[in-house]
Structure formats: C-alpha cells, structure tokens
C-alpha cells in the first residue's frame, strides 16, 4: 500500500486524517512537534516522527527517516485571532513561519523524490477564509492565502512530472481544538474600541447552530485528493466551506 506523510497529527484535522488513512489500509507517517503514541492505534502501518516545520534540521531528519513516500499532507498550522492594528510582529512572523514557510519547506523537501519518480501527491491544507474577508483573522488569512497562491503556481510547474498538487480548504470547526489552540494568541479583548467586536466574533466562532466543518469532512477531502487523479486543485471541506466556495465561484463569474 502507498505511504502518506501527514504533518500536525497531534489533534484536529491531521489526527483524523491519519486515522482515516490507517483505516483504509495505507501506511502512515504521522508527524507531531511532541510525539504522543497514545493518540493513534499501534500497528505495522504507522510510524510517528517528531517534526517541527519551522526547523530546517527537523525537516531534513524527518524526511530522511520517512524514506520513500507517495503523498505529503501539509496540515500543520495555527491561528491567531487579533485585529490587524494590534497584532505583534512576533505573532505575525510565527504565523508565517509555521503556516507559510513551513508548508513551503516541506513541499520543497519532498519534491526531488517525487520528480525523480515522476509520481507523487502534495496536499496543502489551508482555509476557506481565503475565499472571504473576515475580521480578526487578517494575518492568519494572509498566511494561508500565500499558500493558496504558491500552490496554484506549483500545480502548473510540476504536473509535467506526474506530480499532483491540491488545496483542501476547511471551514470553521468548533469541535476541534483549533480555537482553543489559537486562544493564547488572542489580543484586544480589553481594548476600548476593538473589545466589543472581538467578543461578538468569538461568540460566533463557538456557535454550532449553522453549517460547520467537522474533522471527518477534512479527512475525507484529503483522502479524495490523495486517491482521485481527477480531483480538482481546490477542494472545499465542510458544509460552510462548500457554500463559501460556491459563493466565491459565482462572484468570480
């Protein structure tokens, strides 16, 4: 069976994707900043590797340890709910180091083996917020939009080598730990002007009454990209993401 290397498997979309690929008989290399073997079922088809996508040595070590792979899923990332005016240079740099430069570095690390074999699939998990402007996540959105941009160019560059490239765009997922992981980076609740807006937006983030995205939606979209040669470049994952992509397509038309 083929092998998928999936980043950011300690929770959420990455963890669910690793479980799905294992359930369907794939070999899985699940990477985490802090490996926790208890998160996934043990077996001969699973390897867990330590990986920090912001560290070049960590990337080189993980790629060497992984050996030959068939699919790379770039899922590692985080959010920071901060108004553009208030976000610090440090948080901005960290967002781009992880979400953008980390994804780029992993992509560059696997391309030589894919190009040599004239085969391979790269799946970059970004966000449906790249389709629609929202307050409070401007720099997070920018870090993901940059991935959308270079991925669409990459797809044109490497299809001549038999390499497929895809984007999976999840929607809002209150049931995952993405929101709680982003909370330490929250800034501005006590600001006299931005505070009320931030409070209202945070309440909306937690609302599950409307269409939302589940980790299983994203895992299925990733698996579809990995296994279907006719999958499109951009794949919406989750009911809200599907609706937003349809609206964006209508707007473009």
Image (cartoon, rainbow, N blue to C red):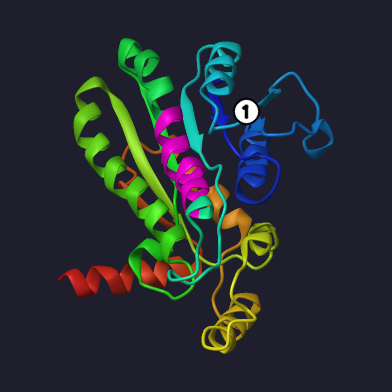
Q: Residues within 10 Å of mark 1 (few under 14, many from 20)?
A: many
Residue numbers of the magenta segment: 92-106
Q: Residue at x 69, y 22 (%)?
A: 45
Does 249 sit left or right of 112 as displayed?
A: left
Q: Residue at x 70, y 42 (%)?
A: 10
Q: Residue at x 56, y 71 (%)?
A: 212
Q: Residue at x 52, y 46 (%)?
A: 94
Is residue 37 shown above or below 83?
above
Q: Camera-side residue: 102 or 245?
A: 102
Find disc 1 in the rendering and name its residue: 51
Query: x, y percentage for residue 195?
Result: 58, 84
Query: x, y percentage for residue 8?
Result: 61, 40
Query: x, y percentage for residue 246?
Result: 32, 70
Locate the C terminus and report the quarter of the image it occupies: bottom left
Query: x, y percentage for residue 11?
Result: 70, 47
Locate the N terminus and report the quarter of the image it occupies: top right
Is residue 129 magenta-colored? no
Is residue 133 shown above or below 163?
below
Which residue in the rendered view is the most extreme toward the right?
38
Is residue 124 shown above or below 85?
above
In the rendered image, which quarter is residue 249 located in? bottom left
Does 166 sit left or right of 93 as displayed?
A: left
């Amino acid at each position: 069976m083929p092998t998928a290397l999936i980043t950011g498997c300690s929770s959420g979309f990455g963890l669910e994707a690793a479980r799905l690929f294992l359930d369907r008989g794939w070999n899985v290399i699940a990477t985490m900043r802090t490996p926790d073997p208890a998160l996934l079922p043990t077996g001969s088809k699973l390897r867990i590797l330590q990986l920090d996508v912001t560290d070049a040595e960590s990337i080189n070590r993980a790629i060497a340890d992984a050996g030959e792979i068939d699919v790379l899923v770039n899922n590692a990332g985080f959010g920071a709910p901060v108004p553009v005016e208030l976000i610090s240079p440090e948080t901005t740099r960290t967002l781009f180091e992880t979400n953008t430069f980390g994804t780029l570095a992993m992509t560059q690390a696997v391309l030589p083996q894919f190009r040599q074999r004239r085969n391979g699939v790269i799946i970059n998990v970004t966000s449906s917020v790249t389709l629609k402007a929202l307050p409070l996540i401007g720099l997070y959105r920018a870090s993901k939009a940059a991935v959308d941009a270079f991925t669409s160019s990459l797809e044109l560059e490497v299809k001549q080598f038999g390499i497929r490239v895809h984007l999976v765009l999840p929607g809002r997922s209150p049931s995952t730990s993405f929101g709680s992981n982003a909370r330490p980076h929250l800034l501005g609740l006590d600001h006299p002007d931005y505070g009320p807006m931030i409070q209202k937006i945070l309440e909306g983030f937690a609302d599950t009454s409307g269409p939302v995205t589940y980790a299983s939606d994203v895992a299925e979209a990733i698996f579809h990209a990995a296994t279907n040669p006719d999958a499109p470049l951009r794949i919406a994952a989750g009911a809200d993401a599907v609706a937003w992509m349809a609206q964006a397509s209508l707007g473009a038309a």
